[in-house]
Image (tube, rainbow, N blue to C red):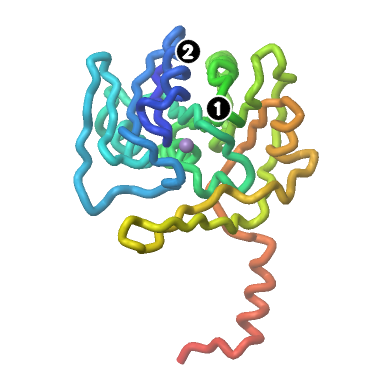
Amino acid sequence: MRILLSNDDGYHAPGIQTLAAALREFAEVQIVAPDRNRSGASNSLTLEMPLRTFTYPDGDIAVQMGTPTDCVYLGVNALMKPAPDIVISGINAGPNLGDDVLYSGTVAAAMEGRHLGLPAIAVSLNGHQHYDTAAAVTCQLLRALMREPLRTGRILNVNVPDLPLAEIKGFRVTRCGSRHPSDKVIPQQDPRGHTLYWIGPPGDKFDAGPDTDFAAVDEGFVSVTALHVDLTAHAAQDKLNDWLARSEVNYG
Ligand code: MN
């Protein structure tokens, strides 16, 4: 199996390095990753400037200033020959639960893989300690996929509790929960008296019901959510049609 491995924390992050080492026990791995932390980059592409790559002696590639989506786009369409069989993104430092998937560069890298026609998995650790656990879990999933291909055509968003492997209770298929709105802005003064602003942390859990990704990880299970990218609110279509028909919105 040929794996394109990317992330949003950057080439040097412990998550991607731990995962690469574990996957290389049984698969061919090409890293194409941002050269720095691009967390929160979501699905952005760099269109206003060219992208320069740096190739390490082992063949791994860092993309200067590249976003996760840039990396997968370049990896699949230009850098990895022959093309990969699967795109894996992670292991992210911190969870990608509920609404996090909208901002996440980790999930975006997997989305780009899926968009380019490949199976894709995003892996995040609900903390910053047990990367080896998340790597082992990812390897288990990969070996299972090799034995028994999964043809959902969806992205798998995997979140792993930050625990020793022996304390993981198993896998649970979940739906995305949600968070309260994030409202923290941290202002600072620069040396010239101007105010600078830092975006604050994500909001607290809002919908963390028993079938959510939040609940699974809290209870010690690996959360696996199948994601698709169609954000259409099908249940609102009729209401919107009725409203347009009734309203004063007219053309011509
Ligand atoms: Mn990240």
Hey, what amino acid is under mark 1? His
**Residue 159: image location, x then y, percent:** 61, 31
**Ligand 1 neighbours mark 1 (CB distance < 8 Å):** no
Q: Which residue does the numbered mark 2 point to in the structure image?
A: 22
Quadrant of the drawing holding the C terminus:
bottom left
Disc 2 marks a residue whose amino acid type is Ala
| 15 vs 26: above or below | below
- Secondary-structure class at tag 1: loop
Say whether residue 156 is visible. Answer: yes
- Measured in 3D between alpha carbons, the distance from the residue under mark 2 to the one under mark 1, in whole angstroms, is 17 Å
The mark that comes first in sequence, 2 or 1, is: 2
> Can I make out residue 148 in this image?
no
The image quadrant where one finds the N terminus is top left
At a point 69% along the width and 41% down the height, the residue shown is 175
Rate crowding at label 1 as few (under 14), some (14 to 19) or many (20 or more) other CA atoms within 10 Å.
some
Q: Quadrant of residue 172?
A: top right
Tell me, for residue 128, which label it has, or none. 1
Residue 144 in percent (x, y) is at 59, 16
Q: Nearer the viewer, mark 2 or mark 1?
A: 1
Which residue corresponds to the image point at 40% horizontal and 62% vertical from the top-left? 195
